[in-house]
Image: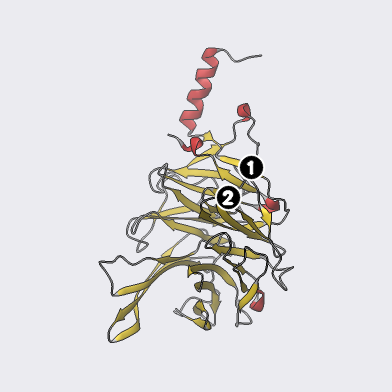
């Protein structure tokens, strides 16, 4: 039986009151069944994705066709949790695993061939996130070893430790979406402070957000600089904490997470900062479950976060979140909003080879 005009208007009013919007992910064909956790959109139609079993994918046409890359040597059983790309030919992928199962590989020929460029030298270490300043320099965030934080510098000269501040026993980060480490570009007005880093970590019972800067002056190249480390609770178990953060300006940032073993719990799943991560505040209306990745869409001025049970958006810098749902009336897949791991807008990736692309019309307010 068709819906009359009055019933239609009531349905529209219900959706508006509940804050439910259309799903925004258009499903794409990846050609793989690997679990995908790494995604990096370079721009100009070029993007790279990575996942289990040494899987790396690449598109040059905005996601219309995803090409399978050659598996890096010795990586058939590795889990590539992070990818950092620079163009259609050059990219670095990071695997996560205990000890030397954490590795970096690099390609410069469009992923036809790969070179192993680094292995984790700590037998009990575990790499969580990689961020590259350019194709020849990268920073890697790993779990703590002997109660010290581990950030590594990689360059053509090799691998060497960077920040090794003290931390709590068992402290580490989540290798969920390659978004718990950030290199901050220092404003030209502040040339002394360089190599500003932000990273998230925790022990399961308490989460930490660290802002670290090194000082570069004529008499100090470099000196250990300012460090701000703030505790922020997101859950109280080993499976809970900060899984992702992003900033849309020098000061305005959002973090998300929760307990991945309780994906439907909305308690303590997001926070926001107005001072560059020096302090954080819990979301007033949190996302509707555990979330593993967050990103900002500048075109629509919208924050978007994803997880296994759905997608949420915020238009007030992380204070309040509302869910997105698929619309069966226009034949959107019933699970288009869920089963996602990582974001690099306009792309999103998830388990079993899932790749989606943002439909910006769905975020129109």
Q: Percent from the top left, x then y, of residue 260?
A: 60, 56
Q: Are marks 1 and 2 in contact (CB under 8 Å)?
A: no
Q: Give residue 311's quadrant in the image.
A: top right
Can the viewer see residue 171 in this picture?
no
| 332 in relation to 288, above or below | above
Instruction: Name the residue at 28% across, 75% down.
Output: 192
Residue nearest the observer in this picture, 165 or 52: 52
Q: Secondary structure at mark 1?
A: strand
Dot 2 alpha-carbon crowd within 10 angstroms: few under 14, some 14 to 19, many 20 or more: many
Dot 1 alpha-carbon crowd within 10 angstroms: few under 14, some 14 to 19, many 20 or more: some
Can the viewer see residue 296 in this picture?
yes
Q: Quadrant of the C terminus?
A: top left
Image colouring: secondary structure
| 198 in relation to 253, above or below | below
- Left or right: where does residue 52 sit relative to residue 303? right
- Left or right: where does residue 116 sit relative to residue 226? right
| 40 in relation to 21, above or below | below
Q: Percent from the top left, x then y, of residue 96?
A: 63, 69
Task: Read off the residue under disc 2.
Answer: 348
Q: Give residue 252's quadrant in the image.
A: bottom left
Residue nearest the observer in this picture, 52 or 109: 109
Instruction: Name the residue at 50% across, 26% down.
Output: 14
Cα gap from disc 1 to disc 2, whole angstroms: 10 Å
Query: Of the numbered discs in the image, which one, if any, rests on residue 50?
Result: none
Instruction: Name the residue at 33% across, 67% down.
Output: 186
Task: Read off the residue under disc 1.
Answer: 27
Q: Secondary structure at mark 2?
A: strand
Q: Percent from the top left, x then y, of residue 207?
A: 48, 65
């Amino acid at each position: 039986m068709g819906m009359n005009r009055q019933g239609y208007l009531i349905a529209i009013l219900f959706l508006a009151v509940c804050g439910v919007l259309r799903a925004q992910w258009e499903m794409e064909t990846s050609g793989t069944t690997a679990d995908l956790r790494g995604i990096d959109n370079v721009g100009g139609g070029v993007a790279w994705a990575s996942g289990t079993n040494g899987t790396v994918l690449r598109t040059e046409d905005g996601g219309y066709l995803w090409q399978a890359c050659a598996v890096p040597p010795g990586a058939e059983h590795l889990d590539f949790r992070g990818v950092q790309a620079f163009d259609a030919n050059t990219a670095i992928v990071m695997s996560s695993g205990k000890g030397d199962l954490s590795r970096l590989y690099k390609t410069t020929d469009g992923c036809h061939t790969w070179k192993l460029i680094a292995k984790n030298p700590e037998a009990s270490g575990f790499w969580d996130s990689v961020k590259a300043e350019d194709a020849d320099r990268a920073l890697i965030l790993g779990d703590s070893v002997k109660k010290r934080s581990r950030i590594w510098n990689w360059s053509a000269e090799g691998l060497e430790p960077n920040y090794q501040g003290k931390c709590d026993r068992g402290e580490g980060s989540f290798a969920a979406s390659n978004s718990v480490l950030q290199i901050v570009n220092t404003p030209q007005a502040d040339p002394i402070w360089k190599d500003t880093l932000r990273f998230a970590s925790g022990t399961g019972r308490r989460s930490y957000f660290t802002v670290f800067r090194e000082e570069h002056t004529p008499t100090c190249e470099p000196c250990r600089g300012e460090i701000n480390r703030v505790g922020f609770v997101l859950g109280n178990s080993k499976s809970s904490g900060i899984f992702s953060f992003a900033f849309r300006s020098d000061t305005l940032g959002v973090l998300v997470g929760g307990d991945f073993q309780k994906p439907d719990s909305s308690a303590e799943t997001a926070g926001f900062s107005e001072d560059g991560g020096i302090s954080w505040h819990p979301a007033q209306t949190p996302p509707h479950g555990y979330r593993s990745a967050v990103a900002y869409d500048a075109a629509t001025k919208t924050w978007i976060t994803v997880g296994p049970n759905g997608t949420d958006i915020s238009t007030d810098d992380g204070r309040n979140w509302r869910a997105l749902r698929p619309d069966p009336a226009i034949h959107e897949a019933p699970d288009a909003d869920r089963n996602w791991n990582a974001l690099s807008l306009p792309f999103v990736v998830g388990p079993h080879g899932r790749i989606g692309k943002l439909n910006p019309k769905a975020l129109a307010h």
